Image: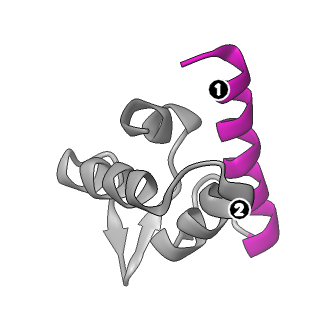
């Protein structure tokens, strides 16, 4: 991935956390991640769904009461 993509994913993660009032140690929902990643057609829904599913399968995101622990930008970048 390019530096621009890294920066964009970092912005997405920070935006999700800011807009949901969640800090790095809180949880955000997969739906919130999808909404922000798919905004303005940054990524197709299928790619985002696949990235989240893969992250869950590999244990990079930990489910807590239907939400997932916040992850670093690297978690999403690996699978997009």
Judge whether residue 8 is colored magenta: yes
Q: Which residue is labeled 1 in the image? A: 6
Towards the viewer: 13 or 37: 37
Which residue appears at 53% of the width and 55% of the height? 70
In the visual, does 10 lie left or right of 43? right
Residues in magenta, as a range: 1-21
Q: Position of residue 21 (x, y in %)?
A: 77, 72
Q: Position of residue 9 (x, y in %)?
A: 65, 39
In the visual, does 11 lie left or right of 13? right
Q: Sequence-wise, which precedes: disc 2 or disc 1?
A: 1
The part of the image, by quadrant, that contains residue 50 is: bottom left
Q: Vertically, is 52 above or below 68?
A: above
Badge 1 marks a residue whose secondary structure is: helix
Q: Residues within 10 Å of mark 2 (few under 14, many from 20)?
A: few
* Quadrant of the frame with the C terminus: top left
Q: Vertically, is 29 above or below 77?
A: below
Q: Vertically, is 43 above or below 74?
A: below
Q: Position of residue 51 (x, y in %)?
A: 37, 49
In the visual, does 5 lie left or right of 67? right
Residue farthest along the left direction in this orientation: 57
Q: Main secondary structure of the magenta part?
A: helix
Q: Which residue is labeled 2 in the image? A: 39
On residue 67, the disc is none
């Amino acid at each position: 991935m390019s530096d621009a993509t890294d920066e964009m994913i970092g912005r997405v993660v920070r935006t999700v956390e800011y807009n949901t009032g969640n800090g790095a140690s809180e949880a955000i929902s997969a739906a919130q991640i999808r909404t922000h990643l798919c905004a303005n057609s940054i990524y197709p829904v299928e790619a985002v769904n696949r990235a989240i599913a893969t992250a869950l399968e590999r244990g990079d995101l930990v489910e807590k009461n239907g939400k997932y622990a916040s992850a670093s930008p690297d978690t999403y970048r690996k699978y997009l």
